[in-house]
Amino acid sequence: MEKLKKLSAKDLINTGIFTAIYFVVMFVFTAVISFAPITYVLLPAFIAILCAPIYMLFITKVKTFGMITIMGVLIGILMVFTTGNSWIMFVFCSLLGLISDLITKAGGYTSKKMSLIGYYVFSIWPVGSFFPIWLMRDAYFDGVVASMGEAYAEGLKAMTPNWIIPVMIAYTIAAGVVGGLVAGKMNKKHFEKAGIA
């Protein structure tokens, strides 16, 4: 296997471009789909499917350790400063980016299987938005009432018991598998050109 290079200016530019595209698509979709508590709760799964082609196309550009980690860090920063998420989201996104990077690196950035597994892990990041339900439930729902109203907050509360986080992770990974399959078909030519088998 070819020795992995250090991050170059081109790597950073590619990471920035794909992170921006990924985030904008996710942000617009979130704004459209979050009108009801049920769609909001299912949002991580929707994002895992919708953004898979963007992430997997990004992977065809990744040959250097750190690019996926940086994407996770950038998404975490954007989620904190543009959507009002807590520092928990930043830590979670950064950690998943690092783990995904390590998994993809284990496949030498040429293994489609390892790239997909890396994506399944990375796709969990939107669940981080719901961690405050688990860790600071009352404060979280006070914020929901202030921003979305009492009826929305009550509906969301009914759909998010304390045990919901593991369930959300499970169905988000399942959606990531679907998204990875869709992305694989859409980006087949790009994968072949990049040497990802």
Image (spheres, helix red, strand yellow):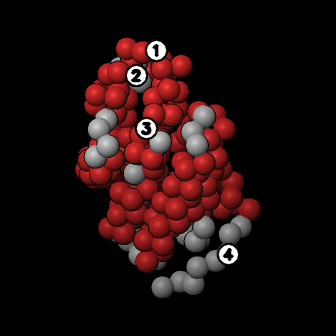
- Residue 127 lies, in percent from the top left, at 41, 45
Label 2 CA crowd tier, 10 Å (few <14, some 14–19, many 20+): many
Amino acid at pointer 1: Gly
Amino acid at pointer 3: Arg
Q: Are marks 2 and 1 in contact (CB under 8 Å)?
A: yes
When the figure is inspected, residue 3 is found, relative to residue 16, above or below; the finding is below
Amino acid at pointer 4: Lys
The residues tagged by marks 3 and 4 sit, at their Cα atoms, a distance apart of 43 Å
Q: Are marks 1 and 4 in contact (CB under 8 Å)?
A: no
Label 1 CA crowd tier, 10 Å (few <14, some 14–19, many 20+): few
Q: Earlier in the sequence, mark 3 or mark 1?
A: 3
Mark seen at residue 153:
2
Q: Residue at x 74, y 62 (%)?
A: 9
Disc 3, SS: helix
Disc 2, SS: helix
When the figure is inspected, residue 40 is found, relative to residue 121, above or below; the finding is above
Q: Is residue 87 visible?
A: yes
**In this figure, which residue is indicated by the disc labeled 1?**
149
Q: Are marks 3 and 2 in contact (CB under 8 Å)?
A: no
**In this figure, which residue is indicated by the disc labeled 4?**
6
The residues tagged by marks 4 and 2 sit, at their Cα atoms, a distance apart of 47 Å
Q: Is residue 39 visible?
A: no
Disc 1, SS: loop
**In this figure, which residue is indicated by the disc labeled 3?**
137
The residues tagged by marks 1 and 4 sit, at their Cα atoms, a distance apart of 49 Å
Mark seen at residue 170:
none
- Residue 50 lies, in percent from the top left, at 38, 38
- Residue 47 lies, in percent from the top left, at 40, 39
